[in-house]
Image (cartoon, rainbow, N blue to C red):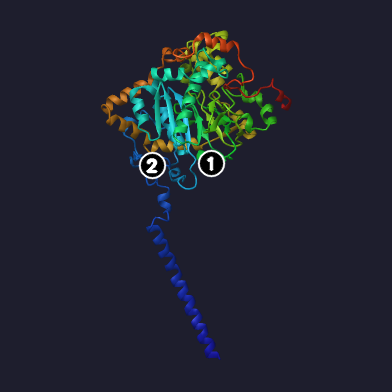
Amino acid sequence: MAGAHSSSHRTTSSRLLLLLTVLPLTLAAFAFLLQWRGGLTDPLTRWSPDQNPFPGMSGPNNLQQQPHRPPSDCTNLMPHSYSPSFPYFRDWKLDYSSGNTTSIYLSFSTSAGLEQTLPWIFYHKVMGVSSFYLFVEGKAASPNVSIVLESIPGVKVIHRTRELEEQQAKSRIWNETWLANFFYKPCNYELFVKQSLNMEMAIVMARDSGMDWIIHLDTDELIHPAGTQEYSMRQLLSDVPGNVDMVIFPNYESSVERDDITEPFSEVSMFKKNYDHLPKDIYFGNYKEATRGNPNYFLTYGNGKSAARIQDHLRPNGAHRWHNYMKTPNEIKLEEAAVLHYTYTKFSDLTSRRDRCGCKPTKEDVKRCFMLDFDRAAFIIASTATEEEMLQWYREHIVWTDKTLNMKLMRKGILTRIYAPMVIIQSLRESGVFSSLIAKAAQTTISKDNFLKSVESSNSTRNSRSEMLSSRKIDAGGVSQAIARRILEVIDDSIPSAIPPLSPPNHDDDDADFITS
């Protein structure tokens, strides 16, 4: 019995030894097989800035194969920012190929140059936007800038030609009342009408392209799809219930901490939260400190932007909302996602806004030109003050230099840090995508040196006041001014007027009862 027991013990020990020997070898072979077939990622290559392209870079132009360092003669157009770089985010893969076919159409009207437009486009490509419809004028309409924009897959560039003006002059909008309050006024009102007409055309294009959603943004705005697992607009909108027609993104406003910002998307990380994302007692209880002597809690608008589901009878309702000719849209307001509005982030924004408007710098005349109080005050300062006085005003009213106040409002939740757009755009820039697009366009047209000089010239040239197309010119081939005057005189109150940019609520509103000591 003892011998049998000893033999059994030896057999068990041999089997255990064999198992301990074979198991590691089997696991090693299995791991090797997976890695050889591409099923396992080497942790070292995961953090390599050159091995994996940033999501959104694949396409017909094979932009992901461009060298990491942009050519030296293109660097001045899209310079590096002060912000830190995070190359490991380039392995942040958002896989939209399976189970998510939601398509998004983004339209905008712009006169901005490449230094602002390229980061804007590619950031939203990363967010999952399928197609872009660009209505361009000013810098954006210059031949060399347009060549670059038109070379980007999914981008359609529409120039403000006489043919476009004639087509928009026939729009049914001119015969309706919902936008009539904005007709035949200069500056911001004129832009508001123009954007609405562009949005109307974009709806047709989006429907013809089979898109699911349409959004209209300015090039100083970025969608912040907070609350999604993959930080994705496509995922966010695909999760919206089918009976919802419109999704409202409350806007957060940039809070710059320096007066020498040159690349807002890459240098600004502090934002002021929207009223809709704050408890009422926090908002009103800290209203005075958060406003800092300005006319309102936000410098500019506070009623956000929206996305609309493509469907029959859809129409714009001003640049901030959509509507439907046959029904009242069912809308929801997002509780986490937002539009990041980079407003007055550069000192030069004071003079650039002034140069686009020919109004007189008086309190009465600016009411005719601008819808919001801060825009009016900024225009007067930019038109009447010296450079030094303007800079001092800019620091007092726009730049957040009081770190103690910043920290207090940060703890209250009024101010917040948002780094994702900064990281994404800086990573895109460092990948060489922007500079390679410019270089490629240069090779297909004129010599690179002349091309770059012409682009730099267009980016530094101010828009003349004569470039601003008046809504009177848009109407020249369509509705007569006499008819338009009758529309203005007899406005049907049963049809809601287009929603303009609106300021957040202030102390005079009914909600002021929530003010705390």
**Image location of residue 139, percent across then percent down:** 39, 21
Reply above or below: 69 against 294.
Answer: below
Mark 1, secondary structure of its residue? helix
Q: Which residue is mark 2?
A: 58
Reply above or below: 390 against 42.
Answer: above
- Badge 2 amino acid: Ser
Horizontal side of 110 relative to 68 (left or right) equals right
Q: Which residue is mark 1?
A: 238
Q: Are marks 2 and 1 in contact (CB under 8 Å)?
A: no
**Depth-wise, is mark 2 or mark 1 nearer the camera?**
1
**Image location of residue 256, percent across then percent down:** 52, 27
- Badge 1 amino acid: Ser
Q: Is residue 334 visible?
A: yes
Horizontal side of 221 relative to 163 (left or right) equals right
Q: Residue at x 57, y 23 (%)?
A: 301
**Image location of residue 110, percent across then percent down:** 44, 24
Distance between the alpha carbons at the discs numbered 2 and 1: 22 Å
Mark 2, secondary structure of its residue? loop
Q: Is residue 192 visible?
A: no
Q: Earlier in the sequence, mark 2 or mark 1?
A: 2
**Image location of residue 440, percent across then percent down:** 31, 33
Q: Which of the two residues, 345 or 462, is positioned nearer the viewer here?
A: 462
Q: Which of the two residues, 10 or 335, is positioned nearer the viewer here?
A: 335
